[in-house]
Image: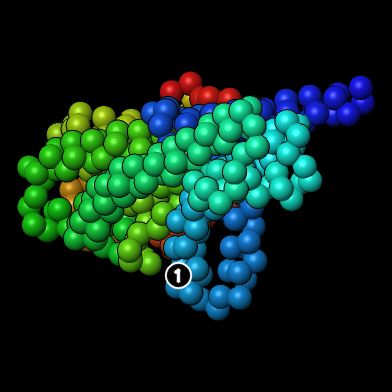
Amino acid sequence: MVADAEAVIAFLVGLLIVVSTVLSAIETLVVPRAIPLRITRAVFLAMRALFGLRGRRAKTFKERDRDMALYGPVSLFTLAASWLTLTGLGYVLMYWALGTRPWRLAMTLSGSSIFTLGFAVPRDLPTTVLAFSEAILGIGLLAMLISYLPSMYQSFQRREAAVAALDVRAGTPPTGAAMLIRISRIEGWRRLDDIWRSWESWFVDVTETHTSQPALVFFRSPHWEHSWVTASGAVLDAASLYSSTVDLPRSPDGELCIRAGYIALRRIADFFAIPHPPDPHWPAEPISIDRREFDAACREMSDAGVPLKPDLEQAWRDFAGWRVNYDRVLLSLASLTMAPYAPWSSDRSIVIRRPPIGRRRTRSGT
């Protein structure tokens, strides 16, 4: 009776492991929705710790960036290996429960089945049924991963095309003030609405891809000085400075771009359970930019011929009112991704407290 009870418990535990692992893979690779999962989170946190230890040997940020460029891809493939390993482990328990003894033989049969090698033959009908089901799941997991990669890299290429193009308008590292100065020098104010609209679309795309495919958050730009996070900050600062400080007609497209941007950053922060105020208001919620930095940016723009509003006190209050919407999430994501240096974002990125793997996240009211 004791042996029968042990077999039943082993079979149920193995079945639970298999079902949980397969559901995790499906929700990660197939379901187009931001679903935080324990297995995925555990793998990425473990790999982050390993890469953190490796990064301590780097003497420069460029060397550290070269190491961290491997973090996203290696973690993704480690996640796939973890799914296969857990599935195989679950089947080992079920084979053992059905009488495939000793453990070594059950492990051999599981490995032969999940990789469809066929060198181990099941001994009876129930074990044969399990072997066929394991082979189907093994092939299915690999097929889902293979089909997932092209979609993910297409999203990565769309993101990086805009980030690289920003170098033309905002420099390296990018800043909002530099972007407005270059537009002013080429008399490109009439084209500014098109720029805001294109970046609004970019933010919408990033919202969808970086929550349904969260590994993309950690895929670094081809050039070590570029980052999707610092690019986001530069565009949002440029739109905020234009809306608050530049003495030109109001741009609804610029304001919509800001809203699309802070919604994108908040949704990504929500996925990673990064705490932030759901509906911040300045001055109750301070921003990381102080008045001296704002005045320095205004002097730089004024010297370059950018028309500024005469009341800079009101302009500062308006800018802070726009910036507070994305200030904390921008700095948190810069810290999370180890973004390269850029003024007003990664130069003051905050240390975020990562919640436990199993913690329920709370969504912000965006």
Quadrant in the rendering for residue 57:
bottom right
Residue 264 vs residue 88, the one in the foreground: 88
- Residue 264: quadrant of the picture: top left
Residue drawn at x 79%, y 46% is: 102
For residue 52, side relative to residue 10 (left or right): left
Of 34 and 96, nearer the camera is 96
Residue 103 in the image, given as x and y percentages of width and height: 77, 46
Q: Quadrant of residue 186?
A: bottom left
Judge by depth and name the residue closer to the eye, 79 or 271.
79
Image coordinates of residue 284 in percent, x first then y, are: 55, 30
Residue found at the very far bottom of the displayed protein:
59
Tell me: 146 left or right of 199.
right
Judge whether 267 appears above or below 246 on screen. above
Residue for badge 1: 66
Q: Along the line of sight, which residue is nearer the eye, 89 or 298? A: 89
Q: Please, what is the three-letter code of the amino acid marked with disc 1?
A: Arg
- Image coords of residue 151 (percent x, y): 30, 43
Residue depicted at 51% across the width and 50% down the height: 117
Identify the residue shown where x is 20% and y is 28%: 252
In the figure, 358 relative to 190: above or below?
above
Secondary structure, mark 1, is helix
Q: Residue at x 76, y 34 (%)?
A: 99
